[in-house]
Image (cartoon, rainbow, N blue to C red):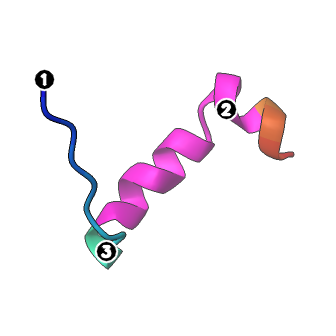
Amino acid sequence: MKITFAPLAESHFSLLLKWLESPHVKKWWD
């Protein structure tokens, strides 16, 4: 398995915001 990382881009913001609104994630960031 090869894991790679890409720089954060504007196109990633919608997915990032969706992830941050997930209940299991949001409880750590509120």
Say which quarter of the image contains residue 29.
top right
Q: Residue at label 2?
A: 25
Is residue 20 magenta-colored? yes
Gap in Å between the C-alphas at discs 1 and 2?
26 Å
Image quarter in which the C terminus is found: top right
- Would residue 12 appear left or right of 19 to someone viewing this image? left
Quickly name the residue at label 1.
Answer: 1
Instruction: Of the two numbered discs 1 and 2 on the same chain, state the one appearing first in sequence.
Output: 1
Residue shown at 31%/74% (left/top)?
9
Give the residue type that dot 3 points to: Ala
Give the main secondary structure, helix, strand or loop, of the magenta stretch.
Answer: helix
**Is residue 14 shown above or below 23?**
below
Residue farthest toward the left in the current orientation of the protein: 1
Q: Secondary structure at mark 2?
A: helix
In this rendering, position of residue 21 left or right of residue 2: right
Which stretch did the figure color magenta?
12-26
Q: Earlier in the sequence, mark 3 or mark 1?
A: 1
Magenta stretch: includes residue 16: yes
Q: Where residue 20 sits: x, y (%)?
A: 60, 45
The image quadrant of residue 25 is top right
* Picture quarter with the N terminus: top left
Q: Locate residue 18, reporting x and y percent.
A: 48, 45
Task: Categorize mark 1 by other alpha carbons within 10 Å: few (<14), some (14-19), many (20+).
Answer: few
